[in-house]
Amino acid sequence: MTMKVVMKVSFKLRSLKCLLNSEYQGDEIYVRYNGRKIWPEDKKWHRMVEGEEVTMDVKQPVVKMGDKVELELWECDFLSHSKLGNFTFLMDSRGGPFTVDMLSNDKKAKYSLVWEAIG
């Protein structure tokens, strides 16, 4: 009987760039993965304005090579939270860094995420 080896990998978020913010004075954003907030780690949200890029150092395990990863970008308003869009990528090999743009239903905001697949 042959055993199939499942390679476990992780992804690392390196940076996030705001190409277009959705609100006049900037977006109060945070990133979620599998239903929980993973960035920023030390506060509720981070305000971003057009042209700003922040360095991230977030590492997350992925179940196995070949899994699709979907990250959600949320905006925190005073009374509610709204989903700005998704970053989706396939964990099919180690490598990077790679850049992926946010997929969104509306065109109010645009963000770009740099990530890499690590062992």
Image (tube, rainbow, N blue to C red):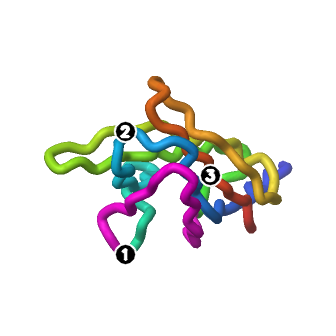
> CA separation, marks 2 and 3?
16 Å
- Closest to the observer: 93 or 43? 43
- Secondary structure of the residue carrying tag 2 is strand
Residues rendered magenta in the picture: 43-60
Could you tell me which residue is drawn at 56 percent across and 32 percent down?
A: 103
- Secondary structure of the residue carrying tag 3 is strand
**Residue 78: x percent and y percent?**
17, 50
Dot placed on the residue nearer the N-terminal end, 2 or 3 = 2
Dot placed on the residue nearer the N-terminal end, 2 or 1 = 1
Amino acid type of the residue that numbered disc 2 sits on in the rendered structure: Lys
Q: What residue does disc 3 label?
A: 113
Return the residue found at the far bottom. Answer: 42
**Residue 71: x percent and y percent?**
51, 47
Would you call the spot at circle 3 few (<14 residues within 10 Å), some (14-19), or many (20 or more)? many
Evaluate if marks 2 and 3 touch, with contact meaning CB atoms under 8 Å apart.
no
Could you tell me which residue is drawn at 30 percent across and 39 percent down?
A: 82
Evaluate if marks 2 and 1 touch, with contact meaning CB atoms under 8 Å apart.
no
Count of picture labels = 3
Apparent side of residue 97 relative to residue 26 in the rendered image (left or right): right
Q: Quadrant of the C terminus?
A: bottom right
Could you tell me which residue is drawn at 44 percent across and 49 percent down?
A: 34
Q: Which mark is residue 42?
A: 1
Main SS of residues in magenta: strand
- Closest to the observer: 60 or 110? 110
Would you call the spot at circle 2 few (<14 residues within 10 Å), some (14-19), or many (20 or more)? some
Could you tell me which residue is drawn at 70 percent across and 42 percent down?
A: 90
- Secondary structure of the residue carrying tag 1 is loop
Q: What residue does disc 2 label?
A: 83
Amino acid type of the residue that numbered disc 1 sits on in the rendered structure: Asp
